[in-house]
Amino acid sequence: MDRLLKYLLAAALCTSTLMGGKVQCPKHSMILEGTKPGMMGSTYHEHLEMHQIAGVGGYDGKWQVDLFRQVVTYPWVLNPPVHTDVKVDFRQGIWMQCKADTIGNRLVSNCTGGNMTLDVYKNRIGLHSTNIWIGKITGKNVSLKFHKENQYEPTITGTIKEFAKGELDITVTAPTEEKFVYSDAAPGVLEIELTAKVTPQQYEADVVWEIPDIGNSQKTVNPASGKGAHVTVRYKGLPKHNMDFGEKEFVARVDTGVCKASDSRKVRVFFPRDARNSPESSLPNWFYYWSQTPARKGPATYGDPLGYCQSTGTRADNLLGYYRSKYLEDHYYICDLTNLGPRFPFNTVKYQGDHFVSLHVEGIDTFAAACWHENAHYTHFRNWWFAHRAVHPFDPVEDFNKNSIKDSVESVLDHDNDLIPDSLEPALGFDPSKKYSFPVNVDDEEIDTWFEESKWQIGSADKEDWAKPGKQWP
Ligand SMILES: [Ca+2]
Ligand SMILES: [Ca+2]
Ligand SMILES: [Ca+2]
């Protein structure tokens, strides 16, 4: 169906449609259609929609015409195109608004609005006042032809639709849960059952589901048509992007022709935090997906080539990650944070004006503290010392203190031996004559990384955390 027709149809249907689970629906309505070959290879199609507006029971009474559509299809493209929108008087005082457009090889006229009515009387359709009958009703089946004598006019047919209570109601009854998580398997699977209840029940088979994608996760809908009161959707393989998780909306629509209704259900989709079934199966999911948020900073690498990662409770022993400054590497390491405990507990530092305080953090905030801290070491060593690296690292003459930096440069640029160039120290808040400017047993380079760690706004990535367990699904 082309866009124009869709629009016109929607506009016509709006007269009897409200969005939401329950909509008003005429108790009795009909949609009649028919097509007949015309002259010179053309075809002529009629479509009539009307609903009963007055009566004393049964089908007898006045019926309002809601839409009268005529479509002529030619074997050739119509040129120049025609677009008109006029009020048409059918007979004295009886009118509809008719919009006609050429669309390729078709001329489509849609008449809506106005005050056109027909009478149904004893299973006949026409104008009671004139005693001219143009259609008949047999059971629920209807047939009608406007001009009996016109050989090019089709007899249009259809059935009467009944809504006993004058309502169409649809309710999404499943899923009932609000949160879903992919399985731990490889590939991870997420299956969601969708059910809807429709009143009158006879329209349940007409339910059509709108089922969202989860990024590039492979979606299979059963039945494939996505139609019916009970549909299952299966997503296979976790998506590539962290932003693909989160809120998803499932919409169930039922369109009876004369009226339509919809209902929807929102859920949130999560990944299993500690499984390794993201597109990078060598990494735990938390590292892969949290790395796509601001919690990650700089060239983090998951792993522990030196076997440093451990957790014995105190900050000093609690290695979340490290930078191998002695090799001036182009990346830093993040440890397996599950070593810390189920919720990744950690005490991070916050600088409050003139002193540091310790704050308890968990989950993605622990990851952020580790990344921001280690990235500071990485940045410092690469910016300040990489240009002065020893030609032969660890050489007893060139690099006796075995830190890959030329001793000859260190002795000039860093008299207090804290690995911050002395010229930069005052601006950074340190004393260039002291390795320990603060009254704690932590040297100035380490304190400077505390400053960076302190800049992380705790909780600021919570809305991007789709881990289970995590900030949005404890
Ligand atoms: Ca050195
Ligand atoms: Ca220094
Ligand atoms: Ca210093």
Image: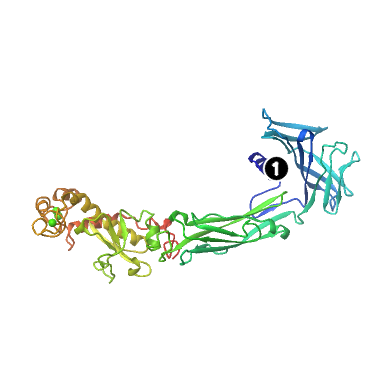
Q: Taking the image as four quarters, which one is ligand 3 found in?
A: bottom left
Q: In which quarter of the image is residue 370?
A: bottom left
Near-viewer residue (223 or 23): 223
Looking at the picture, how far across and down is residue 259, in whole percent?
Answer: 70, 50
Residue at x 74%, y 54% (from the top left corner): 166
Query: In the figure, residue 66 lies in which quadrant?
Result: top right
Question: Compared to 122, does 103 lie above or below?
Answer: above
Is there any visible trace of residue 453 in the rendered image?
Answer: no
For residue 170, side relative to residue 216 (left or right): right
**Image quarter hosting the C terminus:** bottom left
- Furthest-bottom residue in this view: 312
* Residue 179 visible within the image: yes
Front in this rendered view, residue 73 or 86 = 73
From the viewer's side, name the closer residue of 67 and 439: 67
Residue depicted at x 35% and y 58%:
458
For label 1, the residue is 12
**From the viewer's perspective, is 295 left or right of 187?**
left
Q: Which amino acid does label 1 sit on?
A: Ala
